[in-house]
Image: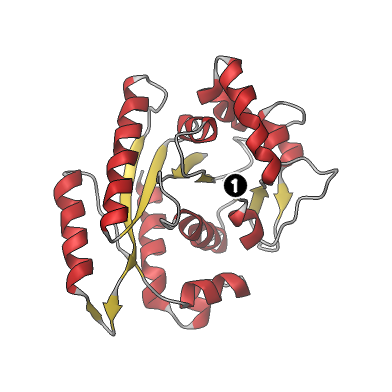
Amino acid sequence: MRTCSCISLSGGQGKTTTIFFTSLLLAQQGKRVLAIDSDPQANLTFYLGHEVQPNQPSLLEVLTGQVSTEDGIYETSYENLFLIPADRGLFKVSDYLSSSGTGAFILKLRLKAVANLFDYVLIDVQPSRSQLCLTAVGASDCVLIPVEANVKGMNSLIDTLDFLQEQSNLMAFTGKILGVVPFRDRWVGNTQTLEGRQNIEAMKEFVGSTPILASIRESEKFKSAIRQGKLLSEMGQTDLQYPFEQIVEALGYE
């Protein structure tokens, strides 16, 4: 089982979009995928069509040990794709994680119980230096860093790389950075804008040997595909699906 987190320390950087389409693509290819929503905003849970009922366990109960990991996993409407959902109550887990003494490793420990059930675990991470972020990164063999192709994205990239280096120095993160994924890269027709090209070049210069993966273009087609619960290729948008195909390939070669 390979575990990959999608992390950026600013909101709106494309984390949930990346996890959603990568999960669907892996599942379509016959891989058993567990998606974990570790953001109290619960956007991934919503995108996958799940609503946590008052009497149902979510990631909160899994992390705090109130239920077994398997009892917090739900089927989705997609074959081979399963979900540990989030809800607003997930905010409550921070105190538990910070007081446990091993908060950075709790999700990793919980996932050991289901390691033989899945090929991939993909985690949508809360965009802050929170206990939830720490435990997600601590559970990860690798991370993806999606960032907007603009100044805000560059600042998020800088903060995220600093955070990962801090966690690596503490041995809380022992994985590797799979790549940086530029998000909302602006194109006009088949031509990348000068702004998009310059911002991605700046990313390449800053990250050095860390791979810059194919950019996710700015397009309303992504929202449309999410609303319909479809892969982009199913909507005739094979060019827009390419970044997620590249991520799947990178995961396979890890």
Q: Nearer the viewer, residue 201 or 252?
A: 201
Q: Is residue 172 above or below residue 215?
A: above
- The residue beneath circle 1 is 37
Q: Is residue 234 above or below residue 204?
A: below
Coloration of the structure image: secondary structure
Image quadrant assignment for residue 166: top left
- Secondary structure of residue under mark 1: strand
Q: Is residue 120 above or below residue 202?
A: above
Q: Residue at x 60, y 72 (%)?
A: 227
The quadrant of the rendering that contains the C terminus is: top left
Q: Is residue 22 above or below residue 100?
A: below
Q: Residue at x 26, y 51 (%)?
A: 154
Q: Residue at x 37, y 68 (%)?
A: 242
Image quadrant assignment for residue 229: bottom right
Q: Residue at x 46, y 35 (%)?
A: 140
Residue 99 located left or right of residue 205: right
Q: Residue furthest top?
A: 101
Image quadrant assignment for residue 73: top right
- For residue 113, say whether it is visible: no
- For residue 210, say whether it is visible: yes
Q: Residue 124: image x %, image y %?
A: 52, 47
Q: Residue 160: image x %, image y %?
A: 34, 40
Q: Nearer the viewer, residue 224 or 127?
A: 127
Residue 99 located left or right of residue 250: right
Q: Residue furthest right?
A: 55
Count of numbered circles in the view = 1
Q: Nearer the viewer, residue 238 or 134?
A: 134
Q: Residue 233: image x %, image y %?
A: 47, 76
Residue 57 located left or right of residue 246: right
